Amino acid sequence: MRKLMPARRAYVLTVYALLIIGSISFLFPLLWMVSTALKPTSQIYAYPPVWWPSPLDWANFREAINFFPFWLYFRNSAIVTVLVVIGSVYSAAFVAYGFSKLNWKGRDWLFFFVLATLMIPAQVLMIPQYVIFTRIGWVDTLLPLIVPAFFGGGAFNIFLFRQYYRTIPKEYSDAARIDGCSEFRIFWQIVLPQSKPAMATAAIFAFLWTWNDFMGPVIYLHSPQNFTLPIGLRAFQQQTGTEWDLLMAASLLVMLPVIVLFFFLQRYFVAGMSMSGLNR
Amino acid sequence: MPAAGNEVTHPRPTSKSGGPLKPRRSRLSRNETIWGWTFVSPWIIGFFAFTALPIALSAWYSFTAYNIYQPPRFIGTANYTVLMTDPLFWTAMYNTFYYTFISVPLMMVIALFLALLLNTKLPGMGVFRTIYFLPSVLSGVGVALLWMWVFNPGSGLINSVLEIFGIRGPLWLHSPEWSKPAMIIMSLWGVGGVMVINLAGLQSIPGSLYDAAKIDGAGWWAQLRYVTIPMLSPTLFFNFITLTIGSLQIFTQAYVMTDGGPVNSTLFYVFYLFNTAFENLRMGYASAMAWILFLIIVGFSLFQIRMSRRWVYYEES
């Protein structure tokens, strides 16, 4: 017993040492960004580098916001993100109901087909989609980024809801069916209220993808008044170039909603990630 | 009662197609069929509008010269044959595979290693998990700008730290030799998502397997080699496929951080495709590139699925 103790202690210490070294290297870039965002301009290129700026230059954030139409881009990003989240969560929940709570011929075959669309890379679709949206006059509006989300919300979200519905006991919906409830009402009033965790997970993923999306806005949004934050940030960078204090302040502001959400809803992030990897 | 044991020895008592007695089944099932198609109809409409039609158009464009302003002009397989002799196409292919073949294995190893560390039942693991997971949910332009600054040769984080140890750091994104390694390092920062998937996989391995292995005298390495990795292999396989497909499509970093340079050293496949389509308006040529990428992804996935029979272990259920 006494001989085992030092070995166990060495093991625990090694684990913690490795984890702490790793954590430092994972956190450093973020801290570096925060520290730069708070630096007075004179300290950005200082040698030796300034790790902890003093005085803290909070005005960088105000300056960054005033330097480019932050609130306009924020508004565009918010419109796209909120609508995509609503569209993909509700339409995926709706479609998945047809794929799991109802029995019909060809259902599983069609579902396999839904999953197969995950294999198609976006690059095959983006050129013809651009041509189609040009034809119907949607280019340089937010519509191409929003509307497709309302048609099933993507294969992954359908899959996610379908997996979740399987855990909801059939008894509730069967009882409602005997009482003459329509399938719409069963979906809306019985199944959906029990699916909050799946809705949270789908909403978080839709939020992340849309908020951070760069390629879609770059393709479809041409005039600055329609920019979302990512391309607004990109345009800001092209104008300021090397004013890293302002660039880091602006980047931090763009990332802030994601960081805040992450700390409040981390367990849904984890649940969604785990689910994407485990249940096939 | 050990219900699970019963299921293995007996033939399954109930069939999926329902019980034997269902007098009103035909009316019910016709109803369910109508409802079923009603519920999935949004997906079907969306599929035709945003997937099927574009795929057909894309296939057609790839055999045409098309600049959007004039109608597509059929040129046979010219796009594909010209691509084969386009040096930039091969540069883009080389860069993309270089990035993928180094980034993905490194991510796989680091994600497994971190998950194994975090799976030890010690206090404080939740905090570490948060720290490693957070960077992976951040992505896009903000992260690209952050790393441009981290890699800044004069005053960036990495070279400043190297300076402390008396090492003169490379030019990173400004150097054709170091630009791809820089992007690989950056990709490792996003390893947390894969780590979380691994962690969930590790936690679903029954402890009894480790107990049995210990009784047989298996040490740390033997347990990893003969219990953990085989049991985790479906998860590892999934990660490998999704990471590879994702890496082959690297775009934002090249667009924001380097514009494909210096000297085309970060001209990645999708970046070249994007420029061909939307900067040069060569939609037909770019469509041919998209189809070649599609074939690479499908070919790779099918190859891996074949290979997986040798090393991925699926539990019978």
Image (spheres, rainbow, N blue to C red):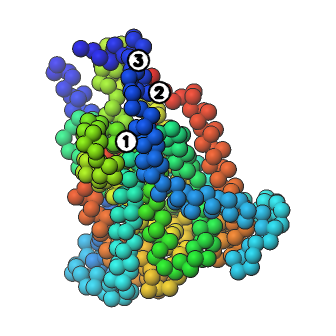
The quarter of the picture where the N terminus of chain B appears is top left
Look at the picture and state if B198 lies above or below B312: below
Q: Secondary structure at mark 1?
A: loop
Residue A78 in the image: state x and y as whole percent.
Answer: 34, 73
The picture places residue A229, in percent across and down from the top left corner, at: 40, 76
- Chain letter of mark 1 equals A
Marked residue chain, label 3: B
Badge 2: how crowded within 10 Å, few (<14), some, or many (20+)? Answer: few
Q: Quadrant of the C terminus of chain B?
A: top left
| Disc 1 to disc 3: CB gap under 8 Å | no
Most foreground residue, B213 or B12: B12
1 and 3 marks on the same chain: no
User: What kind of element bears circle 3?
Assistant: loop
Q: Which mark is residue B12?
A: 3
Q: Which residue is mark 2?
A: B314
Q: Is residue A77 left or right of residue A59?
A: right
Q: Which residue is mark 1?
A: A101
The residue under label 1 is which amino acid type?
Lys
Which is in the foreground here, disc 2 or disc 1? 1
